[in-house]
Image: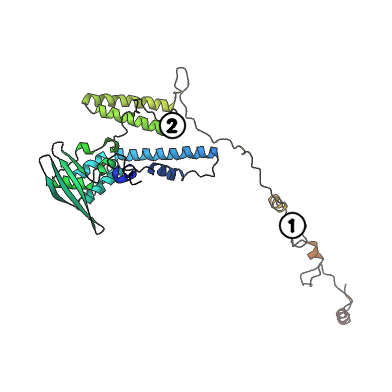
């Protein structure tokens, strides 16, 4: 393994461009992304549905990010011309990485190591976590090119903080074009994408809504860029877009009802659809008590029968109660001794 260290140790492979990814990072990122939507318990049909849903969400996020990058400019922390320049060229994610390198370059110190007729070598030191790290920056005079021993530009594609420290020393306000890769710019997806044989790569044989929108956005952006080259192109594009907008509106509204010999157009209102009973599920089973409550039948609390309530229950009516002065239906016992005394004093009565 030590003899083959140049084939697997990252330090020996940083001069190859890999967009900052390791050998297994691509697979690990894909696994982590799809684990949010699928699991090993899903059936084959469920897996296909969830897989398509994951791709749809990913494409939607990409379109949202493209919209933000096209119509918004990221806020710059450092008010430097180079930082503002890269904010207009880089997408928001890549600009944040560049800005971090630019901020860290302010803490780097340059020291001249050697200089000759062809090149200049600097030692760029940075103190981090109570440790001083030194990188070597070589500037070639003939080609006007700077390279660093950290190989960040060759491996990731973004200029490193050590070279940015050299630019600040030489008072270079704007980033040279050779240090800006097209794949990291906002216009990276503009134009055609071809494979190794020169054939155009299409998004899908059956493009969906998101893919159609992305394709038309790229086409419209290319047309606008070409029209801005001259004043006549701008006027032609403006007139064509207005005419196209009218045609699309007529196509969206549908054919008009104002035909020859026909009646005038009337407003049509959409009604609610008819209610359809769902298949499979039946009505809930109700008990006898719930059915009785729905029919309005009441049961007596005393005897439990229907047709009367507690006040009219026969049990309460047959129970003897104490006589009252207002109860005229209570029978009078005339054999009571009190009535004999009354008869002797007042005589008999009817």
The one nearer the camera, 11 or 317, is 11
Residue furthest toward the left? 117
Q: Is residue 79 visible?
A: no
The quadrant where residue 138 appears: top left
Task: Evaluate if marks 2 and 1 touch, with contact meaning CB atoms under 8 Å apart.
Answer: no
Residue furthest toward the top? 261
Q: Nearer the viewer, mark 2 or mark 1?
A: 2
Q: Position of residue 24 (x, y in %)?
A: 39, 43
Q: Position of residue 121 (x, y in %)?
A: 15, 45
Q: Is residue 65 visible?
A: yes
Q: Residue at x 27, y 35 (%)?
A: 182
Q: Is residue 172 above or below residue 252?
A: below
How many residues crowd around disc 2 within 10 Å: few (fewer than 14), some, or many (20 or more)?
Answer: few
How many residues crowd around disc 1 within 10 Å: few (fewer than 14), some, or many (20 or more)?
Answer: some
In the displayed structure, does residue 319 sit left or right of residue 274? right
Mark 2 or 1, nearer chain start: 2
What residue would you read off at disc 2?
A: 208
What residue would you read off at disc 1?
A: 299
In the displayed structure, does residue 133 sit left or right of residue 201? left
Classify mark 2: helix, strand or loop.
Answer: loop
The quadrant where residue 12 appears: top left
């Amino acid at each position: 393994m030590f003899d083959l260290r140049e084939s697997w140790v990252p330090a020996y492979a940083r001069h190859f461009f890999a967009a900052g990814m390791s050998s297994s990072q691509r697979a690990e990122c894909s696994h982590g992304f799809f684990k949010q939507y699928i699991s090993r318990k899903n059936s084959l049909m469920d897996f296909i549905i969830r897989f398509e849903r994951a791709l749809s969400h990913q494409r939607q996020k990409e379109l949202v990010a493209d919209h933000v990058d096209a119509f918004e400019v990221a806020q710059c922390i450092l008010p430097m011309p180079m930082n503002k320049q890269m904010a207009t060229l880089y997408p928001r994610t890549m600009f944040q990485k560049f800005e971090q390198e630019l901020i860290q370059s302010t803490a780097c110190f340059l020291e001249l190591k050697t200089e000759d007729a062809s090149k200049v070598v600097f030692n760029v030191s940075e103190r981090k976590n109570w440790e001083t790290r030194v990188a070597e920056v070589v500037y070639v005079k003939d080609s006007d090119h700077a390279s660093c021993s950290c190989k960040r530009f060759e491996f990731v594609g973004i200029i490193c903080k050590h070279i940015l420290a050299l630019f600040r020393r030489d008072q270079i306000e704007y980033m040279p074009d050779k240090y800006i890769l097209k794949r990291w710019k906002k216009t990276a997806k503009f134009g055609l994408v071809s494979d190794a044989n020169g054939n155009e790569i299409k998004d899908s044989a059956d493009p969906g809504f998101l893919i159609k929108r992305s394709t038309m956005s790229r086409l419209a952006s290319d047309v606008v860029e070409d029209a801005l080259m001259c004043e006549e192109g701008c006027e032609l594009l403006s007139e064509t877009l207005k005419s196209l907008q009218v045609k699309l509106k007529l196509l969206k509204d549908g054919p008009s009802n104002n035909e020859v010999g026909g009646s005038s157009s009337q407003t049509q209102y959409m009604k609610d659809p008819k209610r359809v009973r769902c298949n499979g599920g039946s009505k809930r089973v109700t008990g006898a008590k719930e059915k009785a409550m729905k029919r309005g039948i009441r049961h007596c609390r005393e005897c439990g029968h229907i047709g009367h309530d507690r006040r009219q229950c026969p049990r309460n009516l047959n129970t003897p109660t104490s006589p009252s002065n207002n109860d005229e239906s209570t029978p009078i016992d005339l054999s009571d001794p009190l009535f004999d005394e009354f008869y002797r004093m007042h005589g008999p009565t009817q």
